[in-house]
Image: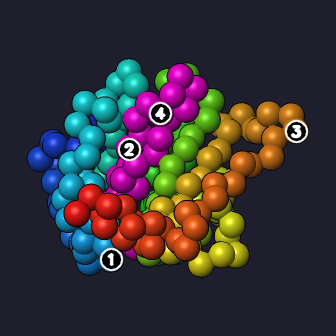
Amino acid sequence: MTDSFLYTTPTAEISRPLVEQLTEEYQNRYGTYFGEDSSAEMNRYPPERFAGPDGAFVLLLRDGVPIAGGAFMRYDENTAEVKRVWTDKNHRRQGLARRILAELEAQAERQGYTRLYLTTGFRQPEARDLYLANGYAALFDVAADPEIYGSLPFEKYLAGPPPGYVPVLVTPPEGGWKQARAAQLAKQA
């Protein structure tokens, strides 16, 4: 068994199985909860955003077959935003997402970033736990019901936080994300 990393694009044929699985997983977990189909989220950013010099898209291959992947894109001058960390459904519980995350962190640092930012959905507790276990600071109250936030933001300074660093927590909308979204949709109607 040989594992290797391959930097490619989300639209490359070799990426297709993982991207399709991730899209299906989003659909199964969220459906239209956020007001649109999961394919909208997967197509929100053009593939070029995940290419150098500002981004990266990496696959972990086992004997030439993709078993995990992830990406980042520019968030601001010093920050890369991690997206699409995913493990093939037949290869879970092997620490592969942790390996992808470590590779993305190393690549972001090679590309000059000093900070990573990401969000994950409230129905993805395994992702939340992955980020917490790997030194990411939760920018939300981890003791609160995660659904009030909708998405859960995290950050990590690659060379350690600046002196006196204290994470700034986001405040959920009054009544929670779902209620705020319903009010927004009612105003649009």
Judging from the image, what secondary structure is the residue with disc 2 in? strand
Q: Mark 1 sits on what residue?
A: 29
Contact, mark 4 vs mark 1 (Cβ under 8 Å): no
Residue, far left: 13
| Magenta stretch: includes residue 169 | no
Which quarter of the figure is the N terminus placed in? bottom left
Q: Residue at x 47, y 33 (%)?
A: 75
Query: Identity of the amino acid at label 4?
Result: Tyr
- Determine the CA span between mark 2 and mark 3: 30 Å
Contact, mark 1 vs mark 3 (Cβ under 8 Å): no
In the visual, does 37 lie left or right of 80?
Answer: left
Judging from the image, what secondary structure is the residue with disc 3 in? loop
Q: Residue at x 55, y 36 (%)?
A: 106
Judging from the image, what secondary structure is the residue with disc 4 in? strand
Q: Mark 3 sits on what residue?
A: 164
Query: Identity of the amino acid at label 2?
Result: Ala
Q: Mark 2 sits on what residue?
A: 71
Q: Mark 4 sits on what residue?
A: 75
Point out residue 91 in the picture as x, y percentages from the top left corner.
35, 71
Q: Is residue 178 visible?
A: yes
Q: Residue at x 63, y 55 (%)?
A: 170
In the visual, does 81 lie left or right of 58?
Answer: right
Query: Identity of the amino acid at label 3?
Result: Gly
Q: Nearer the viewer, residue 86 or 146?
A: 146
